[in-house]
Image (cartoon, grey):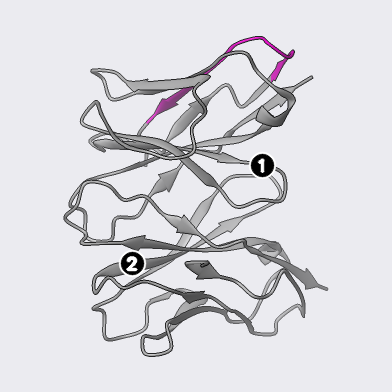
């Protein structure tokens, strides 16, 4: 079965550079979430989209932006990168109204800022 | 106040033994869902088991079962016959609100690092 696809899996950037992470949700899933997980920490919710509209916003810095496109894929854009942005970035998808509301996670994109 | 509390930062368990990972939660919602996820060292987040607040029976999925004690607000994960491949971080998470809502943001615990010894 198709899972959530994230790209790139690994990314190395310098301070003040920009980075874009992509997420392709499971087909027919209408909700996409972005999470940031620092080393040794639990995932922190950044932002979510339902039917291409932003549905909730968490601890996403102003330097970050995200959107969901007409094909339901989502992109997380990060600018003016800081050392503290080094983390594992997860995308997850779900189907609104599904019985359990389970979030299906991608394998994550590991961003390292030097 | 912490909404999800996992009191065991780390655990060592002998292979083939059963292990219980603790999770307590705090919510005033009547409808909520509880999840356990496994995160191996490779980093991916793997769904293990789900318990809805209105489910009367404890959830089970293969070697995983969830010991749901609603009055005590606890949702412990039990892994029977542990295997070396079970070594990973385990996160307890909660979704508040009705499942029909479109926003399924999860609230996460700090995780428990489980190491299975051969």
Picture quadrant of residue B26: bottom left
Q: Which residues are magenta?
A: A12-24
Q: Identify the residue at image location x=60%, y=63%.
A: B90
Label 2, label 1: how far apart the Cα atoms are: 25 Å
Q: 10 Å neighbourhood of mark 1: few (<14), some, or many (≥20)?
A: some
Would residue A18 be counted in the magenta stretch? yes
Instruction: Let me know if residue B51 is in the magenta part.
Output: no
SS assignment at label 2: strand
Residue located farthest toward the right when viewing the structure as drawn: B118
Q: Is residue B10 above or below residue A51?
A: below
Q: Nearer the viewer, residue A44 or A105?
A: A44
In the rendering, at what x and y percent does residue B68 appear?
41, 83
- In the rendered image, residues at marks 2 and 1 fall on the same chain: no
Q: Is residue B15 above or below residue B100?
A: below
Q: Residue A26 in the image: x percent, y percent?
A: 33, 36
Q: Secondary structure at mark 1?
A: loop
Q: Is residue A82 above or below residue B63?
A: above
Residue A35 is situated, as x and y percent measured from the top left of the image, at 50, 39
Q: What predominant SS class does the magenta segment belong to?
A: strand
Residue A21 appearing in the image = no
B68 horizontally vs B110: left or right: left
Which residue is at a point 64% across and 44% down the rendered structure image?
A: B43
Residue ID for mark 2: B33
Residue linked to disc 1: A38
């Amino acid at each position: 079965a198709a899972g959530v696809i994230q790209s790139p899996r690994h990314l190395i950037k310098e301070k003040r550079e920009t980075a874009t992470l992509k997420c392709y949700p499971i087909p027919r899933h209408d909700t996409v979430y972005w999470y940031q997980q620092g080393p040794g920490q639990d995932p922190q919710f950044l932002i979510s989209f339902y039917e291409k509209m932003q549905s909730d916003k968490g601890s996403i810095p102003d330097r970050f932006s995200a959107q969901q496109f007409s094909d339901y894929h989502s992109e997380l854009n990060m600018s003016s990168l800081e050392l503290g942005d080094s983390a594992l970035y997860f995308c997850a998808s779900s189907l609104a109204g599904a019985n359990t509301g389970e979030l299906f996670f991608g394998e994550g994109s590991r961003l390292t800022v030097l | 106040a912490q909404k999800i509390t996992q009191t065991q930062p780390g655990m060592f368990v002998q292979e083939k033994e059963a292990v219980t990972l603790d999770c307590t939660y705090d919510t005033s919602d009547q409808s909520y869902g509880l999840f356990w996820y496994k995160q191996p060292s490779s980093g991916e987040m793997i769904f293990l088991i789900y318990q809805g607040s209105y489910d009367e029976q404890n959830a089970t999925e293969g070697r995983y079962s969830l010991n749901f004690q609603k009055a005590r607000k606890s949702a412990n994960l039990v892994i029977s016959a542990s295997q070396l491949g079970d070594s990973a971080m385990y996160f307890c998470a909660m979704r508040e609100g009705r499942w029909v809502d479109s926003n399924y943001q999860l609230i996460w615990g700090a995780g428990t690092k489980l190491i299975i010894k051969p």
